[in-house]
Every structure is written in structure tokens, then in C-alpha cells.
């Protein structure tokens, strides 16, 4: 993951008064999202997670896992597994470990957390960029610039995604990152600033 994303606009303080579902849309870094998800799981007395997807041969590929998973998950833990359908009809499997089997209400809460996590993790993983740490402050990566340029041209997130061969959700991540790099909170404001600075030519 790029150092720029760790050292600037997307760093956020953990506020216990905010729930994971309300925090997740503001997190623009996959490592930070995994950390926030792990914190939310701790609140539900869970010890970790592993998120996998099947490759073209039907073998599971790990997308994310809790950093503490290897040290905290023991043989005595129970596991709950949620299959979460994504936009491309390829299900993610989120497995959550817990010292004791969750009751019905706690299982429902864990399922809700897993769905929110999956919905935000996949676009972040899809929108990871190599070399983003080389972008100076107040500037944009080439993909962020391209997304803003197409947005100014009147294309929808879906159309932009079709052109770049990424999901509309990943387009949203790029636009939010671009806006944050420019010090604003919306893609519309980012378009105005980027046009004014000549960044979209």
C-alpha cells in the first residue's frame, strides 16, 4: 500500500462514539479499514477475520485478514462464515473467529459488520495504486485525474468504470481520494479545483 495513503489525507482517529458502518465510508486505505473492522469485531467479542474469494480454478485466495489472527485465533475458537454476493456475482467469504459460538443476535450483528466490510474492502483493494506515494501534495495520481476528467465530461461512475475496466465503487474511491488530496470533501469541489489549477488538461 502506498506510503502517501498512510501519511496524509486518509489517516483517521479512532472515535469509539462512531460505529464501524458510519466510519467505513470515510476510510480510504485498506489497512485502516481492516484495523477498524478488527476493532468492531473486538466489540462483538470476536478475535479475528479472514476474507477470501475463489479464483478461476475454484481455489480460495485471501484478500484480507486480521493482523492478530495468527496469534489470537486458537483451536478452541468457533468460526462463523458469511458468503457475501458482490456486484460481479462472485461471492466473498468472510470467516470470523470467536471464543464461543455467537447467539442469534450476535451472529446477526457480525453478519452486518461483514457485509459493510466487504462492500468497502473490495473497492479499496481494486483501487490500490503503485507509485501513489510519489505524488506531491495537492496533486493527483493519473487515475484520479482521469476519473475527474471523465466526470467533468458528464460520464457517470458506471461509465467511467467501464472505460477504466474497474467497478463504479472503485471509481468512487478514486474520486474521494482525489478530492481529499486537493483538500476538499466532494468530487464536485475537486473538479472545480482541478480545472482551476489546470490539472485536468
Image (cartoon, rainbow, N blue to C red):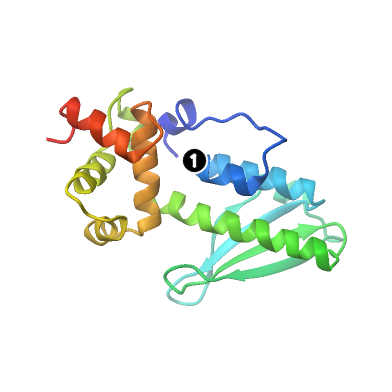
Residue 110 place in picture, x, y as percent: 72, 59
Q: Is residue 4 above or below residue 106?
A: above
Foreground: 155 or 106?
155
Coordinates of residue 51 in the picture (x, y in percent): 59, 60
Q: Left or right: 40 with respect to 129?
A: right
| Residue that mark 1 sits on | 29
Q: Is residue 128 visible?
A: no
Q: Residue furthest left?
A: 201
Residue positioned 15% across, 28% down in the render: 198
Instruction: Judge whether 46 appears above or below 14 on screen.
Output: below
User: What is the quadrant of the N terminus in the image?
Assistant: top left
User: Residue at point 56% right, 45% down?
Assistant: 24
Indicate whether 151 appears above or below 116: above
Q: Is residue 134 left or right of residue 125?
A: left
Residue 100: image location, x then y, percent: 88, 61
In the image, 44 versus 184, the foreground residue is 184
Q: Nearer the viewer, residue 52 or 146?
A: 146
Question: Where's residue 171, x and y in %?
Answer: 34, 51
Total marks in image:
1
Tell me: residue 71, above or below residue 113. above
Would you identify the image quadrant in which residue 32 lies? top right
Q: Is residue 99 visible?
A: yes
Find numbered disc 1 in the image and state the secondary structure of the residue it sits on.
loop
What residue appears at the point 38 percent right and 26 percent down from the top-left corner? 183
Q: Quadrant of the C terminus?
A: top left
Residue at the spot 48% in from the left edge and 31% down from the top edge: 6
Crowding at dot 1, Cα within 10 Å, few <14 / some 14-19 / many 20+, comes out as many
**Farthest residue in the top direction?**
137
Amino acid at each position: 500500500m502506498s506510503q502517501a495513503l498512510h501519511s496524509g489525507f486518509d489517516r483517521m482517529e479512532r472515535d469509539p462514539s462512531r460505529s464501524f458502518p458510519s466510519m467505513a465510508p470515510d476510510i480510504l486505505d485498506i489497512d485502516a479499514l481492516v484495523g477498524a473492522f478488527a476493532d468492531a469485531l473486538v466489540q462483538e467479542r470476536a478475535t479475528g477475520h479472514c476474507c477470501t474469494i475463489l479464483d478461476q480454478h475454484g481455489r480460495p485466495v485471501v484478500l484480507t485478514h486480521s493482523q492478530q489472527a495468527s496469534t489470537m485465533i486458537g483451536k478452541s475458537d468457533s468460526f462463523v462464515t458469511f458468503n457475501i454476493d458482490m456486484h460481479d456475482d462472485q461471492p466473498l467469504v468472510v470467516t470470523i473467529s470467536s471464543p464461543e459460538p455467537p447467539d442469534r443476535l450476535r451472529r446477526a450483528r457480525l453478519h452486518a459488520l461483514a457485509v459493510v466490510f466487504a462492500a468497502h474492502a473490495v473497492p479499496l483493494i481494486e483501487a490500490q495504486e503503485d507509485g501513489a506515494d510519489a505524488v506531491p501534495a495537492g496533486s493527483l495520481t493519473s487515475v484520479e485525474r482521469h476519473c475527474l476528467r471523465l466526470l467533468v465530461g458528464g460520464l457517470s461512475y458506471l461509465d467511467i468504470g467501464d472505460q477504466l475496466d474497474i467497478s463504479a465503487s472503485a471509481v468512487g474511491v478514486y474520486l474521494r481520494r482525489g478530492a481529499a488530496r486537493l483538500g476538499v470533501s466532494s468530487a464536485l469541489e475537486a473538479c472545480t479545483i482541478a480545472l482551476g489549477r489546470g490539472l485536468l488538461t
